[in-house]
Image: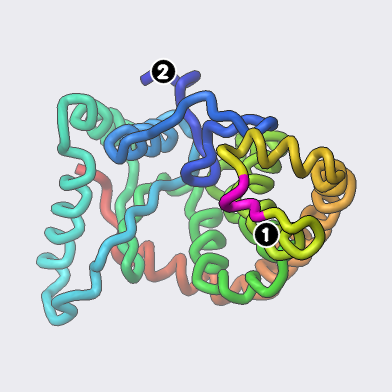
């Protein structure tokens, strides 16, 4: 997999274009994991997080927990020769592995602060779901924390299709008697309809600005809660090991 072939951003919407078409229709689970690890390897992402149930057997000693951590990582990486090759490259890059609650994490030291900010916000994501602007802003920020090189243009397109369109379902049903989930064959048709009704223009001219303003408020919250973020950092460092 070449650097140019890597995709990143909001899951399932990495390949979506402005008009709602997809440059690639399907990414298998193996392709997704391979892509995510390559993103970490080539500095397209700042960390890799694997959601697992790591809370069992809490009475195990540290060595047993570290062995479990190693096994979980091995289950992800040791799938085929491509994955083994990536693992060797990640080891040479001195990638760290750690565990935090139900998450197994791969990262390098210089990105630890962004990782901890991401985890802090992710734990409080329900606080940002009360309205669509807050939801969009939250997802904009945590995506940028993980994928800082992702352009605003691509991210705003992904946000539009993954979150903004679903937020319009009830409004569109009431105003036009149209069901966005059932009355269209694909996202391309949905985009054309919303463009005709000026929702695309509204998103580009108003919603994007509101997202950026709200995002700045979340940044301020991060600064105010630096002590809580430091506690997350301490827990990660305590269980940190170099990938082997």
Residue 91 on the magenta span = no
Residue with the mark numbered 1: 169
Q: Residue furthest front?
A: 177
Q: What residue sits 39% from the left and 38% below the top?
A: 36
- Tag 1, which secondary structure? helix
Q: Is residue 34 above or below residue 4?
A: below
Q: Residue furthest right?
A: 205
Tell me, yes or no, if residue 141 can be seen here. no
Q: What residue sits 54% from the left and 41% below the top?
A: 9
Q: Is residue 67 above or below residue 224?
A: above
Depth check: 153 or 21 in front?
A: 21
Where does residue 222 sit, x and y in percent of width and height? 66, 67
CB atoms of marks 2 and 1 within 8 Å: no
Q: Residues within 10 Å of mark 1 (few under 14, many from 20)?
A: some
Quarter of the image with the N terminus is: top left
User: What's the mark number on residue 237?
Assistant: none
- Per the picture, the main secondary structure of the magenta-coloured stretch is loop
Q: Is residue 99 above or below residue 35?
A: below
Left/right placement of residue 165 relative to residue 73 reads: right
Left/right placement of residue 216 relative to residue 13 reads: right
Residue numbers of the magenta segment: 179-183
User: What's the mark number on residue 2?
Assistant: 2
First in sequence, mark 2 or 1: give its number: 2
Depth check: 109 or 138 in front?
A: 138
Where does residue 6 sit, x and y in percent of width and height? 46, 27
Q: What residue sits 62% from the left and 76% below the top?
A: 127
Q: Residues within 10 Å of mark 2 (few under 14, many from 20)?
A: few
Residue 181 on the magenta span = yes
Where does residue 37 sit, x and y in percent of width and height? 35, 37
Depth check: 203 or 210 in front?
A: 203
């Amino acid at each position: 997999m070449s650097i140019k072939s890597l995709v990143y951003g909001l899951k399932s919407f990495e390949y979506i274009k402005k008009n709602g078409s997809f440059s690639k229709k399907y990414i298998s689970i193996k392709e997704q994991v391979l892509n995510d690890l390559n993103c970490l390897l080539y500095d397209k992402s700042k960390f890799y997080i694997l959601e697992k149930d790591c809370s069992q057997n809490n009475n195990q000693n540290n060595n047993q927990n570290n062995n479990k951590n190693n096994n979980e990582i091995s289950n992800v990486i040791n799938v085929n020769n491509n994955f083994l090759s990536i693992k060797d490259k990640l080891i040479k890059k001195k990638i760290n592995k750690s565990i935090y609650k139900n998450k197994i994490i791969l990262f390098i030291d210089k990105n630890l602060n962004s990782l901890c900010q991401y985890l802090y916000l992710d734990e409080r994501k329900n606080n940002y779901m009360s309205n669509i602007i807050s939801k969009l802003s939250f997802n904009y920020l945590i995506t940028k924390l993980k994928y800082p090189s992702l352009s605003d243009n691509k991210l705003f397109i992904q946000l539009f299709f993954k979150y903004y369109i679903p937020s319009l379902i009830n409004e569109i049903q009431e105003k036009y008697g149209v069901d966005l989930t059932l009355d269209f064959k694909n996202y391309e048709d949905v985009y054309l309809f919303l463009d005709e009704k000026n929702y695309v223009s509204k998103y580009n001219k108003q919603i994007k600005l509101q997202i950026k303003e709200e995002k700045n408020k979340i940044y301020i919250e991060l600064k105010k809660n630096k002590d809580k973020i430091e506690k997350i950092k301490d827990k990660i460092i305590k269980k940190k090991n170099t990938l082997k």
